[in-house]
Image (cartoon, helix red, strand yellow):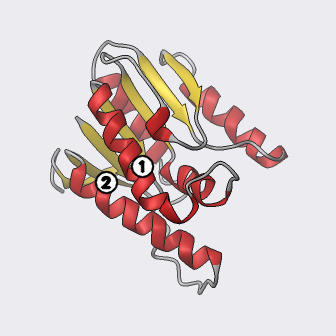
Amino acid sequence: MMILVTGGSGSGKSAYAEDRVVSLGDGRRIYIATMHPYDEESMRRVKRHRLLRSGKGFETVERYTNLGGLLLPQDSIVLLECMSNLVANEMYQEDGAHEKTVSEVFRGVRELSEQVRHLVIVTNEIFSEAACYQGDTVRYQEYLGKINQLLALFADEVVEVVYGIPVWHKGGRIS
């Protein structure tokens, strides 16, 4: 089963996704961390997320690009956090997919979902901001939007977390 979890910054989507993985039963719990820690702030965020996951039985695999090249045990329950970071990495890192980001990320997710028992993916809802962007930021939003749409079609469940409250858009409990 694949579950897509979305929400705005600070919405509670990470905590919901972690709890959802735990609720999916026993098995090897793997957290795929996509945030490449490059400064002090990102190191603090990584530390905070590790603290939130402590005691939940996750083993962490850091993967910044090339999701399709990752091999995981079939019985595993995987949390991929987060799609927004993975897309940026694929677009801008030297070893990234660049203009092939959309197809390569989706291919990687499909391959991953075929390997594991359950896959929970966290992504960000960044599309309701009133700000106007230009250049690479617009292209980033376009790529992330296309990937999120593909993931939503492919997923068994799509849930948006708003103020810590899950709202199902597909599968689960439709609210």
Circle 1: residue type: Gly
Task: Say which residue appears at 15% left-offset and 54% top-offset.
Answer: 174
Question: Callout 1: helix, strand or loop?
Answer: loop
Q: Quick one: label 2 or label 1, which is nearer the N terminus?
A: 2
Q: Position of residue 66 (x, y in %)?
A: 53, 42
Quarter of the image where the C terminus is located = bottom left
The residue nearer to you, when weighing 48 against 61, is 61
Q: Position of residue 17 (x, y in %)?
A: 40, 38
How far separated are the C-alphas under marks 2 and 1?
A: 22 Å
Quarter of the image where the N terminus is located = top left
- Identify the residue position indicated by label 2 in the image: 151
Q: Is residue 143 left or right of residue 159?
A: right
Q: In this view, does 136 lie to the left or right of 110?
A: right
Question: Callout 2: helix, strand or loop?
Answer: helix
Q: In this view, does 101 lie to the left or right of 22?
A: right
Q: Which of marks 2 and 1 is in front?
A: 2
Above or below, 90 relative to 52: below
User: Hey, which quadrant is residue 71 in on the image?
Assistant: top left
Q: How many labels does the image show?
A: 2
Q: Is residue 142 left or right of residue 76?
A: right
Mark 1 closeness class: few <14, some 14–19, many ≥20 residues within 10 Å: some
Task: Say which residue appears at 61% left-offset and 42% top-offset.
Answer: 64
Q: Where residue 164 is drawn, which disc sits there?
A: 1
Above or below, 8 relative to 128: above
Q: Position of residue 25 (x, y in %)?
A: 28, 17
User: Hey, which quadrant is residue 162 in on the image?
Assistant: bottom left
Above or below, 145 relative to 168: below
Circle 2: residue type: Leu
Task: Say which residue appears at 55% left-offset and 26% top-offset.
Answer: 53
